[in-house]
Image: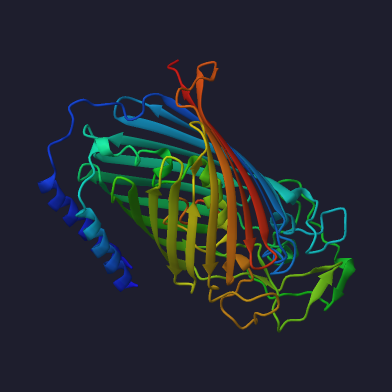
């Protein structure tokens, strides 16, 4: 993969050198601002899902989850060439995945097909990203850098990255390169019944009651799994992205992009239970106690190649298409294809019907509930790493007012977007999502 | 896989050699719906896909890291 990326970088450098020779001296002396005024995007989404193959309960049980995410993105022109963008969001979610880490703290019998109603059922994910971009006087070169922070109950992240884009051939061609590093850290939260084997037992920081009704244990007793916690709490991700876009005619343009990613550290999720087929089963109420948690290799390399092709059919219709091939060294191969047909029904309103197909092969380490053996080195029953295909149907509507007539204080409304998605796997998994965005431009204060 | 990448690069080379479209001919290409990037509201879609699917990247969204996703 390193050789491959080296070859591609060399090709890009050679292309830049040769094109510089050809570059026409058409760069205008007049320099317009990269961003005329401050722009504010207020975005939000509501997401819900359900299914019967929860990873927290070893491949069986409810995957119920709801998530509400308000986000604000503010882009500020610092001068003619530079733009500062601040992006902050809060994701408020309730999930069976987090609640069934401790299925015994609710007001009903513990059951993998019912989310616990205890304190662990809801939490917050917060993230802040700041980015800065600089454009050259001829607007043919753009540099940018970014810093990001995020935090949730069991995971925190610090990230940084940069990118460089170069336009040439009368801005018909663009080459870009970007790199990102994420230094993440887990808070090691194991399934509650395994914590007594790591010395983690007790009331946690949220005051959550972690007492387990051991007197109700049925099936195999005594419950005494051979469990060792993880030593590594970190997860580091390094990505290199290359992009190429090209205008092909007055109505057709396309792009190719390639992402190379390497991750190391704790790539397993510490609270995903595993039930081995060669170990006896113990239960409390209707909930089976874990034999272990998922164990995945400490290194993963990914390669994604994607292409977009957009065609302007006429004043009413545009066709937007996308395809991606993905492969990694865990044995996953995937194809994604999507199409969206924006339909302009007036000068202000556009409709966005869309369809997306996705499929993937299973990771080498995946097996369903009770199918793993305790003699294996790596194992997971996370159905997100299983073989599946999915269909996604979307419909959106957009209102755009290029004259920004609607005003609120110093804000001028530019556009409103509303979209709905329905996602269906070839299993019991289903998800729905509604997203909403409103864009304002702002007068100088 | 390497052959596919080389093929992509060669195809890219042919595309670069196409006749350049002048600025005044880009009326259709400048339509916002012709952008080769996704809209800001589409970030939520790519985020949930990064959590629920093993594949990610090459779409302007997450490639891994920064979240407890795949």
**Residue A387: image location, x then y, percent:** 58, 72
- The reply to whether residue B65 is in sight is no
* Residue A335 as seen in the image, left or right of residue B23: right
Residue at 28% across, 26% down = A32
Q: Say if A35 sits above or below A296 in the image.
A: above
**Residue A50: image location, x then y, percent:** 71, 58
Residue in front for this viewpoint, B48 or A219: B48
* Residue A107 as seen in the image, left or right of residue A320: right
Q: Say if A207 sits above or below A104 in the image.
A: above
- The reply to whether residue A199 is in sight is yes
**Residue A363: image location, x then y, percent:** 54, 73
* Residue A46 as seen in the image, left or right of residue A282: left
* Image quadrant where one finds the N terminus of chain A: bottom left
**Residue B68: image location, x then y, percent:** 56, 55
Residue at 34% across, 36% down = A133
Residue in front for this viewpoint, A340 or A445: A340
Residue pushed farthest left? A21
Residue at 33% across, 40% down = A144
**Which color mode does the image show?**
rainbow
């Amino acid at each position: 993969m390193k050789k491959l990326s080296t070859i591609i970088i060399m090709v890009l450098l050679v292309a830049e050198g040769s094109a510089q020779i050809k570059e026409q001296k058409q760069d205008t002396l007049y320099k317009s601002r990269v961003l005329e005024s401050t722009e504010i995007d207020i975005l939000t989404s509501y997401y819900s899902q359900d299914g019967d193959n929860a990873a927290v309960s070893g491949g069986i049980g409810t995957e119920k989850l709801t998530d509400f995410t308000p986000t604000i993105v503010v882009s500020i022109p610092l001068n003619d060439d530079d733009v500062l963008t601040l992006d902050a969001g809060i994701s408020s979610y309730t999930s069976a995945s987090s609640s069934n880490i401790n299925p015994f703290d609710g007001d009903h019998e513990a059951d993998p097909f019912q989310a616990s109603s205890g304190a662990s059922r809801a939490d917050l994910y917060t993230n802040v990203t700041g980015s800065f971009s600089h454009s050259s006087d001829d607007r043919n070169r753009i540099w940018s850098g970014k810093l990001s922070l995020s935090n949730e109950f069991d995971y925190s992240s610090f990230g940084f990255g940069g990118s460089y884009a170069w336009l040439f051939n009368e801005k018909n061609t663009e080459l870009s390169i970007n790199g990102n590093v994420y230094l993440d850290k887990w808070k090691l939260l194991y399934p509650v019944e395994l914590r007594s084997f790591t010395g983690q037992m007790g009331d946690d920081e949220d005051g959550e009651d972690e007492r387990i009704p051991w007197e109700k244990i049925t099936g195999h007793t005594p419950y005494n799994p051979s469990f060792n916690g993880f030593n590594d709490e970190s997860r580091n991700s390094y990505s290199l992205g290359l992009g190429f876009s090209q205008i092909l005619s007055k109505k057709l343009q396309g792009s190719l992009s390639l992402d190379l990613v390497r991750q190391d550290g704790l790539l397993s999720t510490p609270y995903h239970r595993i039930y081995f087929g060669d170990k006896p089963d113990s239960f409390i109420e209707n909930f089976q106690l874990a034999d272990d948690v998922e164990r995945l290799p400490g290194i993963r390399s990914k390669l994604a190649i994607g292409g977009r092709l957009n065609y302007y059919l006429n004043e009413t219709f545009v066709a937007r298409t996308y395809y991606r091939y993905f492969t990694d060294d865990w044995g996953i191969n995937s194809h994604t294809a999507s199409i969206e047909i924006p339909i302009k029904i007036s000068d202000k309103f556009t409709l966005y019907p869309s369809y997306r197909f996705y499929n993937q092969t299973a990771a080498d380490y995946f097996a369903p509930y009770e199918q793993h053996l305790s003699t294996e080195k790596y194992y997971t029953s996370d159905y997100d790493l299983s073989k599946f295909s999915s269909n996604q149907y979307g419909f959106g509507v957009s209102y755009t007012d290029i004259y920004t007539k609607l005003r609120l204080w110093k804000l001028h409304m530019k556009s409103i977007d509303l979209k709905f998605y329905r996602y269906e796997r070839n299993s019991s998994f289903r998800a729905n999502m509604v997203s909403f965005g409103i864009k304002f431009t702002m007068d100088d204060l | 896989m390497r052959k596919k990448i080389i093929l992509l690069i060669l195809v890219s080379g042919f595309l670069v050699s196409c006749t350049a479209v002048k600025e005044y001919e880009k009326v259709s290409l400048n339509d916002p719906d012709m952008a080769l990037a996704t809209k800001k509201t589409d970030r939520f879609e790519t985020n949930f896909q990064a959590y629920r699917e093993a594949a990610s990247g090459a779409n302007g969204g997450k490639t891994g890291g920064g979240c407890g996703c795949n």
